[in-house]
Amino acid sequence: MKLVGLLFGIAFGFLLALGGLNEYEVIHSMLLLEDFQPYLIMGSAVAVAAPTLWLLERRGFTTPFAGPMNPGRSKVERHHIAGSAIFGSGWAVAGTCPAPALAMTGSGAMLGLVVVGGMFAGLMARDYAETRSGVDLTDLDLGMRSAPKVGAG
Amino acid sequence: MDLLPDRVAWYVVGPLIGLLVAGMFALANKPLGASGAYVQTIAAIRKRASEPWRAWYFAGLLIGAVIASALQGKLQLRTGYELMLDLWSLPTTVIVLAVGGVVMGYGARMAGGCTSGHGLCGTSARSVASFTATATFMSVAIGVTFALHWLTGGRL
C-alpha cells in the first residue's frame, strides 16, 4: 500500500504540474473567474470518477486491499460548512490549496514551503482545539478521522 | 528539456485525475485527499500514523511535480509568488502566505477535507457533505479573492 500511495502521489503531482495548477497565477486567475481551465479539470475529473464508482459499486466490485467497494459518505454537519468557509478564505489568500502547494514547491517555487509549513501548523492547531474541547468533529474519513490526535502531545 | 508543453489541455489532465480518484477507491475504498496526507505525514514523523501510505502519497506529490516541471523545462528555484512580490516586500508576503496556510490547514481539518478530498473524491462518491463543503469553499474563495482584488486596487 505504501508503494501504491507513492505512485498515486507521483501521478497526481505530475498531473497538477502538467495542468498548471502548481502556479499561483493560475489559481488566482481561476478564483477571479478569469481562467476556467481549473474548473474544467475538476469537473472532468469528477465526470470520469463518479460514473466509474457508481458502476463498480453497482456491480459489487471487491477491492484488492479493503473488501467490498464502499466509498464513505457523510451527512452535512455544521463543521463541514464552517470549516470549508475557513478553508476557502485561506485558499484565496495563498492562491493554492494543499495538493497544489506541494506541486508548487516541487517545481521549485520556494514560497510554497511557507504555505506548506502554515498548513501543518493549522492542522495541528485544529487538532489541539478539538482535543481540548473533547469532541471529535471530523467524521468523514479522509485519512483524518482514524489519525491520532497529532496536536495533543 | 522541453518535452512537455507548459499547460496540457484540461480534457487530458482532468480525466486522468478522475482515473486516479476512482482508482484509489477501487483499490482500497480510500479517498485521495491531500489534507489527510499532511495529517498522516505529521503522524508518521511521530511514529503513530494510522495510514502510513498517505505519508508516501505526500512525498509522491512533490516528486511528481519535480518530474513534470523537469520535462516542461521549468524546474528552477524561484519564489512562485512574483505577482504578490510586485505589491509587497518579501517579509510581508511570507507573513501573508503563512497566515493563508494556517487558515487553510485549520479549515481543512475542521471540514474533514479540502479541494481534493471533498472537491474531487467526496463529490465523485456522491457524499452530500462533500457537495456542501465544495460549494462553500468555492464560493468563499471566489468572494475573498474578489475582495483582495478590490482592496489592492486591482493589483492582485
Image (cartoon, coloured by chain):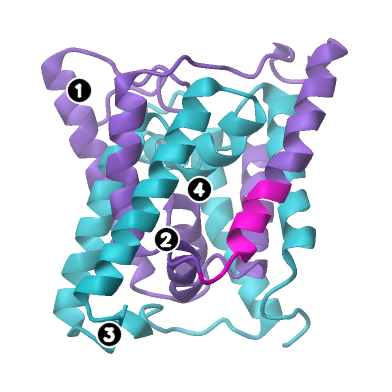
Chain colours: A purple, B cyan
Q: Which residue has dot 3 on it? A: B85
Q: Between marks 3 and 2, how big is the CA–CA gap?
A: 16 Å
Residue at image point 83% right, 13% down: A58
SS class of the residue under badge 3? helix
Decide whether the magenta segment is chiefly helix, strand or loop.
helix
Q: Give the chain of mark 2.
A: A
Q: Give the chain of mark 3.
A: B
Q: Between marks 3 and 1, how big is the CA–CA gap?
A: 36 Å
Quick check: do tags 3 and 2 share a chain? no
At label 3, which amino acid type do we have? Leu
Q: Between marks 4 and 3, how big is the CA–CA gap?
A: 28 Å
Looking at the rendered structure, which numbered label has been put on residue B58?
4
Question: Viewer-proximal residue, B55 or B138?
Answer: B138
Q: Which residue has dot 2 on it? A: A96
Q: Position of residue B30 (x, y in %)?
A: 61, 26
Magenta stretch: give its range: A34-44
Snapshot quadrant of residue B91: bottom left
At label 2, which amino acid type do we have? Thr
Q: Between marks 2 and 1, how big is the CA–CA gap?
A: 26 Å
Q: Position of residue B45 (x, y in %)?
A: 35, 40
At label 1, which amino acid type do we have? Glu
State which tag comes first along the sequence, 4 or 3: 4
Q: Between marks 1 and 4, how big is the CA–CA gap?
A: 24 Å
